[in-house]
Amino acid sequence: MKILALGAHPDDIEIFMFGTLAAYAALGAELTFAIATDGAKGGKGDPKALVKARREEATAASFEVPVLHADTLGGTGFSPSHYVDISSHWDLKAQAILAHRSQGPEHYLNGARMQNAFRAGQCNGAPGALAEAFRFEPLFPFADIRELLPPAPRIRPVTVGPKTVR
């Protein structure tokens, strides 16, 4: 399987999806990373016109592949549809985040760990589990991407009073 990871800024891939990419690599996937900016603020011309033009250009590309949106910083305004267990890949993700020395990476490292622990809890992962969250946007002809993702955290039974719910 070939995976293309897109990030807006030089450290976005590491912060938001590196654990999942490590899981793909462990399964033998070929990874390619693309970064949309060099991290500096820029652009020429009217910003509103540029946004409109870029949106039209992206639409003209007619992507015919499933699109997964990575979680947002702090999870703000994000409703995940899929989770990936990254527990065994955390150390590699941490090293990748810390490689961005110019960005004060400890702040992002701590935030990513807290967010990944929250997402694991959100999908009822085991204590100490870590997960990355994604939202799937179906684009024809794709309807179900579950078989394309690395495994999600195992679902644990939930005990409610004397009953166990599976």
Image (tube, rainbow, N blue to C red):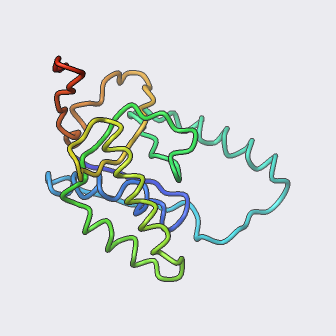
Q: Horizontally, is 21 left or right of 106 in the view?
A: left
Q: Is residue 91 above or below residue 68?
A: below
Q: Is residue 91 above or below residue 125?
A: below
User: Which residue appears farthest toward the bottom when viewing the image?
Assistant: 101
Q: Residue at x 31, y 50 (%)?
A: 3
Q: Position of residue 33 (x, y in %)?
A: 39, 60
User: Which residue appears farthest toward the right when viewing the image?
Assistant: 46
Q: Is residue 36 above or below residue 143?
A: below
Q: Residue at x 39, y 78 (%)?
A: 99
Q: Horizontally, is 159 left or right of 43 in the view?
A: left
Q: Residue at x 39, y 34 (%)?
A: 65
Q: Nearer the viewer, residue 154 or 56?
A: 154
Q: Quadrant of the C terminus?
A: top left
Q: Nearer the viewer, residue 43 or 111?
A: 111
Q: Position of residue 136 (x, y in %)?
A: 41, 32
Q: Position of residue 2 (x, y in %)?
A: 26, 49
User: Which residue appears farthest toward the front when viewing the image?
Assistant: 161
* Numbered-mark total: 0
Q: Nearer the viewer, residue 146 or 80?
A: 80
Q: Position of residue 114 (x, y in %)?
A: 40, 56
Q: Residue at x 80, y 53 (%)?
A: 47
Q: Nearer the viewer, residue 117 or 162?
A: 162
